[in-house]
Image (cartoon, rainbow, N blue to C red):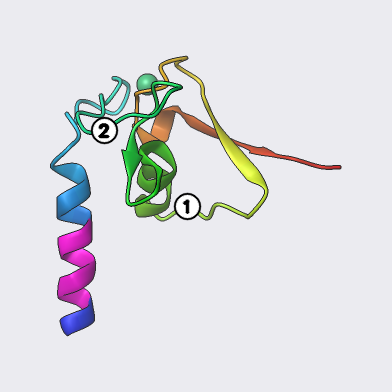
Amino acid sequence: MLQMIRRYERRRRFWRRVRVGGPTECWPWLGRTNGNGEGVHDGRTAHEYAYQLAGRPLPSGASLEHRCGNSWCVNPHHLELREHRT
Ligand SMILES: [Zn+2]
């Protein structure tokens, strides 16, 4: 139970910093950003965080690409998984 509340709190703290729009719109990150203009949250990029909060797995070594081209966008629908193979 306590863990559920903590998880809910974490999500709430995250989405509070996002201007959530419609599914096809860009969702601007309103919090801190890094040098690339990407959102930063809890030591990670905000779009990675949003992607995982949306219930999608992010394998290690993979990265996310913005299909909309806006690095500040955290709409999970605009993110595409890129697996890096060496
Ligand atoms: Zn977008």
Question: Within the displayed image, which quadrant is ligand 1 positioned in?
Answer: top left
Q: Is residue 44 above or below residue 74?
A: below
Label drawn at residue 80:
none
Residue at the (64%, 44%) spot, across then down: 62
Which stretch is magenta? Answer: 4-10
Q: Is mark 2 within 8 Å of ligand 1?
A: no
Viewer-proximal residue among 8 and 30: 30
Q: Left or right of 24: which side holds 14? A: left
Q: Is residue 68 above or below residue 77?
A: above
Label drawn at residue 32:
2
Q: Position of residue 1 (x, y in %)?
A: 17, 85
Amino acid type, mark 2: Arg
- Report how many numbered discs are placed on residues in the image: 2
Looking at the image, is mark 1 or mark 2 earlier in the sequence? 2
Q: Position of residue 30 (x, y in %)?
A: 19, 28
Label drawn at residue 56:
1
Point out the image quarter for the C terminus: top right
* Image quarter of residue 19: top left
